[in-house]
Amino acid sequence: MSKPTICVIVPVYKAMATLDRCVESILAQEVSGGLTCILVDDGSPDDSGKLCDAWAARDARVTVIHQEDKGVSGARNAGIDAADSAYIVFLDSDDALRPGALQAAVDAQNAAPSNFVVWHYTTNEHDPAAVTSDAAPRPQDALARLWLDCLLAMPWNKLYRTELAQQLKFDEQYTLGEDLQFVLDYIALLGTRTPTFGYTVLSAPLTFYDCSRGGTLSTRYHADYCKVWPEHFSKLNKACYAAHCPQDDMRPLHRAELTVYAEGVADILRRDPAKRKAVRRDKAYAALRSPWLHALLERMRIEGAYSAYYLPCRWRSIRLVWTLAEAKRTDSPLYGKLDWAGYYLLRGKLRRD
């Protein structure tokens, strides 16, 4: 018996409220060659595991793995190991696939067999946009642009070849940004197998992303934030330079990296559990002395890439970084004023584009 075309891997943890919607969206898909679904109950303390078993009892295409809590990376790794399909798609238990999504992805893959298929997503559960296999090819040097277009960092908007994905692991030591590491590892492995590969980006949003859960900085504090993101960004930059990404993409990429880092510094001041302000300030100041940050600022100077955070970070001004980040977070007009003030102080030596 031939392998099914796609296996959808879903990590499950405290997912009682959304799991039915997620699984229903998977099983409603019609895919040439068939599909399977692996639900990985990652030691969920509620009845999510029982709900997974109920789905397996109801539909033979569903397999359940029960394991102790290993985190989302450990859950995905268990699913990868168990997959027996041509391709893998990841989906989070609070998200859903739009009708026709998987066949559209397969059609795009069949149209360009050597490419890595990537798609857009929507935050509107009732998005009226049609699901089609219409796609635009992008070359390897579009890697930085994929990041800037919010298409790179997540694992659940891509079609992976199972035999390649099974040679990789999500790094379980990370609890932040680990998805980007896996995607970059997959791209590097794909490049060794198919040096001429490109990207196929579907224009239709195929996945519903439930953004009600909020972003990283808005959910919980990560004490190692300013250590972890430089590691991820170093790997991303290395991959982008290897792909010969154009300078017009690298400048905004570096601006984005500086913003992520600076807002992490501000988050130390906002939410670090240290009771004394002096301790939080010392931690934030240590982050501003980071050699990685210094190298990034120097690179931006050479590239002529301006950011509102450039001078505050160059001056190692905790107060200015905090003020900018708070103004941006609260949509205060002060952010724009400080942004333009920094630009004029530099007398146009760095570019805003």
Image (cartoon, rainbow, N blue to C red):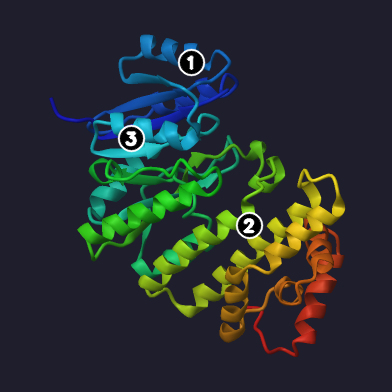
Residue beneath the point at 80% across and 54% down:
279
Residue 42 visible from this viewpoint: yes
Q: Looking at the image, is mark 2 or mark 1 earlier in the sequence?
A: 1
Q: Is residue 190 left or right of residue 266?
A: left
Give the secondary structure at mark 1: helix
Which dot marks residue 80?
Answer: 3
Camera-side residue of 22 and 134: 22
Q: Amino acid at mark 3?
A: Ile
Give the secondary structure at mark 3: helix
- The residue labelled by disc 2 is 226
Label 3 environment density (alpha carbons within 10 Å; few <14, some 14–19, many ≥20): many
Q: Looking at the image, is mark 3 or mark 2 earlier in the sequence?
A: 3
Q: Residue furthest left?
A: 1
Q: CA distance from mark 3 to mark 2?
A: 30 Å
Check contact, mark 3 vs mark 2: CB within 8 A: no
- The residue labelled by disc 1 is 49
